[in-house]
Image (tube, rainbow, N blue to C red):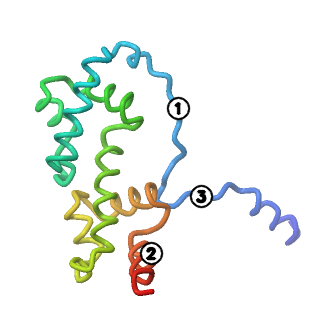
């Protein structure tokens, strides 16, 4: 194969997403039509209260099973409500709030002495890889890149 042909083959290969992120596939799940809207609305409010207001997302061990138990429902129904009301699964929901708080902490001068791993633990990530993957998925850049960019913007 000539160098020209070799270059063409390389250009056609799809660009690999960082952190093993995959494209989101839309699924048509039959259970969504079985959710009672009044109960789903009530659970939605309770989920927001527990996960966001009580900041349970900060606990890396807080599972969907724990939340279902607290809401006195089962995990399948809880998952269906989270999917239909939030448009994502349980772990993505928690990660979204974790990343939001991490973004705040990364740019807050009171936490300037904390490294990225410490901030990741503070907001509830169990390990560095899951933090970087979730951060990149939600923000489009790495936590270090985000911090550097926003710290220099504040100085201007």
Eyeballing the image, is 138 above or below 63?
Answer: below
**Within 10 Å of the Cα at label 2, are there few (<14), some (14-19), or many (20+) other Cα atoms?**
few
Q: Which residue is mark 2?
A: 145
Q: Quadrant of residue 2?
A: bottom right
Q: Quadrant of residue 11?
A: bottom right
Residue 136 placed where, x, y %? 45, 61
In the drawing, does residue 136 fall left or right of residue 51?
Answer: right
Of the two numbered discs 3 and 1 in the rendering, the one whose residue sits closer to the viewer? 1
Q: Which residue is mark 3?
A: 16
Secondary structure of the residue carrying numbered label 2: helix
Residue at point 12%, 24% (across, down)? 72
Secondary structure of the residue carrying numbered label 3: loop
Q: Which residue is mark 1?
A: 26
Of the two numbered discs 2 and 3 in the rendering, the one whose residue sits closer to the viewer? 2
Residue at point 68%, 54% (across, down)? 14
Residue at point 17%, 30% (across, down)? 68
Tag shown at residue 151: none
In the drawing, does residue 6 fall left or right of residue 27?
Answer: right
């Amino acid at each position: 194969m000539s160098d020209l042909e070799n270059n063409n083959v390389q250009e056609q290969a799809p660009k690999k997403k960082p952190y093993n992120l995959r494209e989101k596939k839309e699924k048509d799940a039959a259970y969504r039509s079985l959710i009672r809207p009044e109960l789903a609305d009530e659970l939605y409010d309770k989920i927001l209260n527990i996960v966001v207001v009580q900041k349970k997302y900060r606990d890396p061990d807080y599972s969907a099973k724990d939340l279902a138990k607290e809401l006195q429902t089962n995990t399948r129904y809880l998952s269906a409500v989270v999917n239909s009301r939030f448009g994502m699964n349980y772990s993505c929901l928690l990660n979204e709030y974790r990343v939001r708080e991490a973004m705040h902490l990364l740019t807050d001068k009171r936490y300037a002495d904390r490294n990225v791993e410490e901030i990741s633990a503070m907001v509830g990530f169990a390990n560095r890889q899951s933090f970087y993957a979730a951060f990149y998925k939600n923000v489009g850049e790495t936590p270090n890149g985000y911090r550097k960019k926003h710290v220099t913007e504040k100085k201007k």
